[in-house]
Image: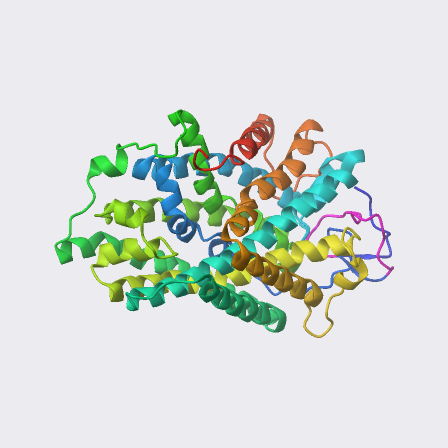
Amino acid sequence: MADHDPHEKVEPSTGVESSSASGENPPSGTLINVSGHKQELERNFGLISLCGLGITSGNTWIALGGSLTVAIYNGGLPGVIYEFIAASFFYWFIAASIAELASAIPSSGGVYHWATITAGRYGRPCGWFAGWWNCLAWLFGLASTAQIVAAQTVSMYALRHPGFVTQKWHVFVSYLLVTWITGLIVLYLNRALPTIETIGGFTVVFGVFISIIVCAVMPKSNGAPYATTYSVWADWENTTGYTSSGFVFLLGMLNGSFSVGTPDIVTHLAEEVPHPSKNIPKAILFQFVFGFLSGFFYLIAILYGINDLPAVLTSTYLFPLAEIYRQTTGSPAGAIALLVLVLIPTFLSCIGCYVTASRVFWTLARDHATPFSHFFAHVDARRRNPFRAIVFCAAFATAMGCIYVGSSTAFAAFVGAFVVLSALSYLAAILPHLLSRRRNVTPGWFWMRGATGFVVNGVSCAFIGVFVVIFCFPFGMP
């Protein structure tokens, strides 16, 4: 990596020097960050708010609950648990690889910037693909999160009105409200975002704690039966139409991957947090430890609370947890109360997705990798955020909502590509790092030394290479 001009000021919090991925040098006398660009964003996030963003936008236990009915077809209740454990195991390798690169090269561009450097002379095309795969993944992730919040609100209304028939336009109206309310928060409350994400982190912790206790205690209080230990841990059921149970297990890992497959969330705030080389790996570690533990114990609690599995699978509620909570608590009112604990952090998760998606798109524009790059690379001097990039993300999400009205299947296909696109973007950064024998990157605060780094990177690449193909299969035999 090239050194800066001695007359330029190097940002003291990074301790690392780098040249711009675009090959352009900022004007002399400006504050330079590790990406080689002028430091334009305020460093108003701290470690706690960064961890809050990670667990709120990562949203592991809520993502598991939201995709539960699809996961059940891939092995029944045991499949849900074991496939989540397996997916988490491999994503720990990916998270470690991401944390290492984020520590060495803390940049809001994330995988885009890392791929540009690790790939050496092939850095430009590799970085371009990595950046756009990652950007599209987070744009789809934003749309998916907004749709989940919309489905939650409509399902909560349906619980209180048994004769209510859900229509697509009901979800669309709620979707637009969520998309633009959260978008306006990100646009105009930039300095409040660290506080919001800190609150979000506490709501996630509080929500999963209360949900686990209620789901564990309420069935006994209501005299309702629990699911049997055999049905939760051993009753494997393959209802996908595929003949190979092994393939079904691998395919079912998509649901676990969707819930934990977000190790790069906090990396895109590298230019908005002090000491990113240290704080980002710490936040990734916290996100994955909490995500796995909360997801695992939450799954056990809700799966034991199911006393009528066919009713869950055939429920008319858009959000699967609505029927599960109704069975667990024994009443619509109790289900709504638990859904509120899901709704609040999911709403705040939408804010985090906005922040991540807009930062990725903005860094691409900053390096002239988007149409109208000069326009979208602008940072609002008053609000100190990439205002135009945020508006673009809101417009994109709105367009995705229109697709939902036209075809929910097409919408599901788009947002379902999140795992594949994000995994490909990670591969574009990690694989060149491995093939170059890890020599193109100057180690940061967190660095896997010796054979450890090669093994972790190698397992990450092998997992992604195999599963991006498997995850493209439909969850059931056509």
Number of on-image labels? 0
Query: Residue 163 or 252: which is nearer the viewer?
Result: 163
- Looking at the image, the residue that sits furthest to the left is 223
Closer to the camera, 117 or 226? 226
Residue 188 can be seen in this image: yes
Residue 286: in magenta span: no
Q: Nearer the viewer, residue 300 or 474?
A: 474
Residue 49 visible at all: no
Q: Percent x, y for residue 237?
A: 31, 33
Picture residue at 12% right of the left edge, 54% below the top:
223
Residue positioned 54% across, 41% down in the render: 95
Measuring from the top left, give residue 119's x and y in whole percent. Answer: 74, 35
Q: Main secondary structure of the magenta part?
A: loop
Residue 27 picture location, percent across and down: 87, 60
What is the quadrant of residue 11 in the picture?
A: bottom right
Please identify the quarter of the rendering in which residue 334 is found.
bottom left
Residues drawn in magenta: 11-28
Q: Residue at x 57, y 61 (%)?
A: 402
Horizontal and vertical percent for residue 232?
26, 39
Name the residue at 39% across, 62% down: 166
Q: Is residue 416 left or right of residue 338?
A: right
**Which image quarter holds the N terminus?**
top right
Q: Is residue 269 left or right of residue 295?
A: right
Question: How are the residues colored?
Answer: rainbow
